[in-house]
Image: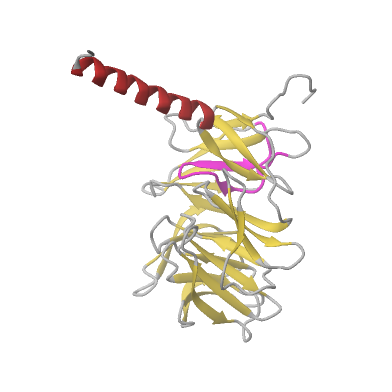
Amino acid sequence: MMRPTMKLLLVGLMFFNALFAQATIQGPLTGWIWDGDGTRPLLGIPGASVIGEKRTGAIPLSRVAVSPTGDYLLGIGVEDQRVYLMEMRTSVMRAVEGIAAGAEVIALSPGGRAAAVLHAGAGRLEVVTGLPGSARIAGVIDLSAEGMPYLVAVSDDAGVLLAAFPGAEDLVAIDTGGNRWRLPHSGRLRGISFFNHRRDALLADDRGVWWLRDFAGNARAELMLEAEALQVLPAADAGHALVTTGEAVLLLNLETGATRRIECACKPGTLARLSGSVFRIREAHGGEPLWIVDVSADQTRATFVPWEVKAGTDQ
């Protein structure tokens, strides 16, 4: 008869092997990207990852927004203009109930749990919360008086939106009840981004990067970086932010205001969050590698992600 200690050892080994096999099959992921008509995983960890094989869903999508948590995406159906949610690992797709057809723009919150869906033709904006598993409409905002914003951002709790409208100098805050108030920033914006799980936000314009705080009270905007900024995204630790200019990517220390140029053998493109601390700073075009930055690393630097090479192919 097998002794109890031996049984426990064998059970433990079987459990460990099962976990190891699962990890081997799934493996680490840096994030996901949208490649025109499907998703591609970034297999591996920052600095040692490759762009994996494409996965396509059952319905053609356009104007896709990939969740920064890497578990889903939202996209607009090419044929019916409905909003669909696709799970990244399984490619399973479903229409998000309650969102009307005719959507044109989707903006996700920094933590991916809320979204703003713009309907230009109908002159309204729908606020969605509970993503991805319990999506519901938290509010419908009539924009017929202002028109469609050229920039919009939504907080993770779906409680506040920031919108910049063509022809208007002021930035406008809107809650889910449709209440509006003007905020202390004027001029054309190029980027708006909330902090994770907070209602503070960073703004980018041709004068620099601004930290906007205390929306509901004594709202104020503090200039953190004086430079022509194109885009800005805060890191998960809220102590740093990535900023793109026309020619450079900068790491901005939000406590001291100090900046460091991140060297990259590429020209910055669209800035996007792949996870809490990993950012895409340039897309992969025409077989060229993707460029990313891991802000959590001891030495923050840009690294490229090549395409996965399959046996018997030139790529």
Outermost residue to the left: 4
Residues rendered magenta in the picture:
265-284
Is residue 221 left or right of 25 when viewed as pictured? left
92 over 14 or under it: above or below: below
Is residue 298 left or right of 30 when viewed as pictured? left
Foreground residue, 259 or 203?
203
- The residue drawn where x is 74% and y is 55% is 60
Outermost residue to the front: 1
The x and y percentages for residue 139 are 49, 77
Outermost residue to the bottom: 145
Foreground residue, 115 or 187?
115
Residue 228 seen in this snapshot: no
The x and y percentages for residue 290 are 66, 36
295 over 113 or under it: above or below: above
Image quadrant in which the C terminus is located: top right
Q: How is the image coloured?
A: secondary structure
- The residue drawn where x is 43% and y is 36% is 296
- The residue drawn where x is 36% and y is 68% is 214
Foreground residue, 254 or 71?
71
Residue 250 seen in this snapshot: yes
Image quadrant in which the N terminus is located: top left
Is residue 65 within the magenta segment? no
The x and y percentages for residue 211 are 44, 59
Foreground residue, 175 or 133?
133
Residue 62 picture quarter: bottom right
The x and y percentages for residue 113 are 47, 59
